[in-house]
Image (cartoon, rainbow, N blue to C red):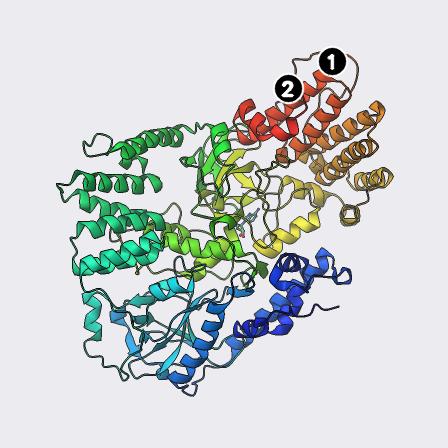
Amino acid sequence: MAASLPNVPDLARLVQSMGIRPEMLQQAMSDPNFRSLVSRNPAFAGLSPSADQDTSGDEALSRMTRLLEQAKAIHLREQSLPPVRVPQIPASMLLAGFARSGNQSRNMNESTAVQIRQTFVGVAPGYATKKLEELRRVGINDMFVRKRQEGAYLLCRIISLTSHTVSVDMIVEDPLGVACMLAIYHYPTTLDCAEEQGDAIFPIGAVLAVREPYYKFPSSGEVPFIRVDAPSDLIFLKSHSHRALLNDVTWATRGPSGVIRQPGTAVAWKDRGNRYFKRKEWICAASAFSDGLLQDPENHLLLLNRAAAYLELGWFRSAAYDAERVIGMDLEDPQLVRKAVYRAAKAYYLSGRFDEVRRFACLVSSGAETQQLCQNAEQRLHERDSGEYDWAGIFNASRAPASRPDIAAYQGPVEVRTPKGSARPRGLFVTRDVKAGELLIVSKPIASYFPEDTPSKRGEVFMSFNFLKNTTDKRSDYALIDLVVQRIWDDPDLASVVQAMYAGKGFPAAGDYPVLPVNASPALLHSSTPCADIDVGRVEGVCSMNVFAMGELTFTGTAPEQQEYSELDHPAALYELPSFCNHACLPSAGRVFFGDVMVVRATTDLKAGEEVTMSYCDSTQPYQKREDVTQKKWHFACDCSLCKADLSDSAAARSRRAEAVNLPSSPGITAIKQRIAQIKSTYSNTLERRQCGIKPELYSALHTLGGAYCKEMNATRTLIPAKAELCIIAFMDALEATGLVITDRSVSGRVKEPSVLPVDSTKFPCLAHYCIPTIMQMASAFHAIGQGVRTKRWIKVAIWVEHLRTGGGETLFRQKYQLLLSGIPF
Ligand SMILES: C[S@@+](CC[C@H](N)C(=O)[O-])C[C@H]1O[C@@H](n2cnc3c(N)ncnc32)[C@H](O)[C@@H]1O
C-alpha cells in the first residue's frame, strides 16, 4: 500500500516548488530509512507507517534505486534535447512568483515546518577557467537554455531577496532589464545558512558577473534558471579593477527597491563586519572587512578582524597573511600587536605549520595564549616526527561529540606510487619492512562533517541523488562536498591535491602525487573570490570515491557517550593519504578513528615495497556481495588472498555459502548449528584457502552461536557450566576462522602456563577488529564459570590485539572497553 502525502499545509506546494513530483515523494515514503525519519517528526503526524507498509531492506533499496533511476532518466533526457531560446518572462512576474515561494518558506513555523531538500551530484556542466577580461558579455536573451555559454559572461544585478533550499536562489536582471532566476550551489557556509544570511551574502543591488553561465530548465517546470555549480564562476564586481568593466554599462531599469545602503567608510564597514562577527556569520563578516579594505587597504583593525573571521572559516593561509601584515606595521598598541601575533600563530598552528609557530615563542610581544600555542606546537612537532602519541588522552578527548582531536598528522614509512611493470593501479606502499601493528599514518581530514555541526532543522528530509555512483546519498555526503570547496577556497595547494586524487570513471586522469607547491598569490584578494578556479565536478567525484564514514569498524560496547545517528546522516570525512590506498578484502592495514582523525596501522608484517591496502567493504560478507561493491562502485575485481581462496571453491559452493549466510536469522541453536554445517561444507581444502587462512562467513556464524548460548543462559538466569563451555568453544572456533592461532584451547582444569598467552602472538589476525568483541564475550563466559586465570589470559589477548590495532596499550584498552570490562575483576 502506498503511503499518502502528509497532512501538512503547504507541503504539496513546497514539494512542487522544489521540483519533486508527488509520486517521487510517494515512492520515497516507502523506504524504511526515509520513513523512520519522517515518523520521528511531529510535522508528519498521521503519516506513521502501518505494519502493512513495512518493506524488507532489499525491497526498500530497490525502490530507492528506482527513484534514483527516474531522476537520472529525467536528467539524461534533458541533456539529450537541443538547446532552445525561451520567450521572455517579465521581471515583475518572476519577482512576484519568487517572492511568494520565498515568503512561504520564510514564514514557516520552525517547529512544524517540513523541509524537503533535494539535490543532485554529478550534474555540474564544467567550471570557468578564463579570466573575466577574456570573456565577452552576453545578456539573458542572448543565451540558450540547456547550454553552457562558453567564452561568455553574464553581467547582472540582484533584484530580490534570496530563497534557500540547497542552493541560494535569487532573481537577477541584466543591463537590459531582462530577469531570470540564479541558483548558486556550494558557496561556502550557505548549505545551512538562514535566509537572512543569504540576503547578506547576496544583497539586493549587488552586481555580479557569472562566467560561462549555464542556463537550464528545472527538473520539473518550464521556467529556466541559471545554475552556478562552481562558486568560483561567480564574481562580485566590487574592486577598482572590476569597476572598469562597468564603465560603459547603463542599466535599463532604475534598479531594485530594498537596496540596503552600503557603508561609505572603512570604519563603517568595520562596524558592520563586527556585527556579523558577533552573530557568527563569518563569511559576511569577512566580506564586510574585505570591502572596508578596498577603501583603506592599510587599515590594521580591518586586517586584524578579517584574520579572526578567516580563522573561523578555516582560511588559515589568508588569516596568517593578514595577521603578519599587522605585525609588520610595528604598531605602538601592545594589545593589538599581541592579538596579531596570536592570530598569525593560530593560523599556522591550525594549518599544521608547527615550525612557523615556533617563530613566535621568543617574541616579546607574544602573550600567554601564544606561548601556550608554542608549547602545544612543540608537542605536535614531536608527534609528527616520531609517531609517538598519547593515545589514551586522545581517546578521551575524542569521546566528545563532533570531536576533532588536536594532534599532528604523521606519515610513517609509506609512499604513494604507481608500481612499474604491473597492472596494479597507483597505491600506497611501505618504504621499509614493517611489523604488524606498526603505525603507518595518522591522518587529519581535509574536511570532516558531523551531524552535530549543524543543529538539525526539525523535519528536514535531505535527498541527494548521486549520478556518479548511482546511489541515494546521505546528507553528510553532500555536505562534505561543500566543506571541501570551502577548504579549497583559500588553499591552492589543496586544490592540486584534490586534482591529484582519484575521482572515478568519466573524469580526466588524476594529476601526479605528491603535488608541487602552487605559485599563487599569498592570500585571498577579497573573501568573496577564491584563490583558484574550483573544479566542482571533480570535487564531487573525489568526495564520492574517497569519503570515509568515520566511526566505522570501531566497537567498544554501547558506551553511553557514543552518539547515535540517523540512517540518513552520519559523520563523514575526506582524507589525503588514506585515499590513495587500494582495496583488499583481506587488507594489509586497518583503520581506527579518534574523532575525525584516522589512524592506519599494518595488520600484517610487510616487506619494503609491499602494498598497504584497506578494505572498502565488510570482509565477512560472502564473495558475491563483496564483488558487487567493488565492481559496481569502484569498477575493479579484487584479487586479494581471500578472493583467491573464494574463487578456488566452486561457483556452486560459493552460491550455497551465500545462501546460507543470507538465510533469515533464527535464534535457535539447532538452526544456527545447521547453518554452520552448511557454511563449513562449502569451503574446500585448497592451497589458496590454506594460504589465506581465514573463513570470514564461518566466523560470523560461530560468533552468533557463542552469543546464542550466552543469551539462552541469560534468559533462564541459570548458569550451566557445560553450556558456558560450549559457548567458549564456539567463540574459540570463531576466532580461529579469523586467522587467530590458538595454542591452548582448554576450557577447564589447571592452566599449565598462566603467564603465556593462549595464542601464537607471532600471527596477528587480519580481521582483528572482529576479534575483540568475541574475545571479550569469551572472557566474560570464563569469568561466569569462575575461571579467573583463563579470564585474565584472554583479556590479555584482547589487549594484545587491540594494542596492535589501535595502540595505547592497556591504559587505552581499559578506557575504551570500560563497559565491557565492568564486573570482570581485571
Ligand atoms: C580510493 S581510490 C584508490 C587509489 C587509486 N588507485 C588512485 O590512484 O588514487 C579507488 C580506486 O582505485 C582502484 N583500485 C582500488 N583497489 C583496487 C584493486 N584492489 N584492484 C584494482 N584497482 C583498485 C579503482 O580504480 C578504484 O576505483
Residue at 78% in and 27% down? 729
Tell me residue 388's x, y (percent).
Answer: 43, 27
From where the camera sits, is residue 516 visible?
no
Q: Nearer the viewer, residue 666 or 411?
A: 666
Is the residue indicated by label 1 positioned so its CB lies within 8 Å of ligand 1?
A: no
Tell me residue 724's x, y (percent).
Answer: 80, 26
Question: Considering the image in quadrants, where does the C terminus appear?
Answer: top right
How packed mark 1 is, by other alpha carbons closer than 10 Å (few <14, some 14-19, many 20 or more), is some
- Label 1 or label 2, whichever comes before in sequence order: 1
Q: Nearer the viewer, residue 203 or 223?
A: 203
Q: Is residue 332 left or right of residue 470?
A: left
The circle on residue 811 is none
How packed mark 2 is, by other alpha carbons closer than 10 Å (few <14, some 14-19, many 20 or more), is few
Q: Does residue 223 lie above or below 626 as drawn?
A: below
Tell me residue 26's x, y (percent).
Answer: 66, 69
The circle on residue 826 is 2
Question: Considering the image in quadrants, where does the N terminus appear?
Answer: bottom right
Q: Is residue 435 left or right of residue 712?
A: left
- Disc 1 residue type (three-letter): Val
Under tag 2, what secondary structure? loop
The circle on residue 751 is 1
Tell me residue 725's x, y (percent).
Answer: 80, 25
Residue at 17% in and 52% down? 299
Q: Does residue 781 lie above or below 562 as drawn?
A: above
From where the camera sits, is residue 324 visible?
yes
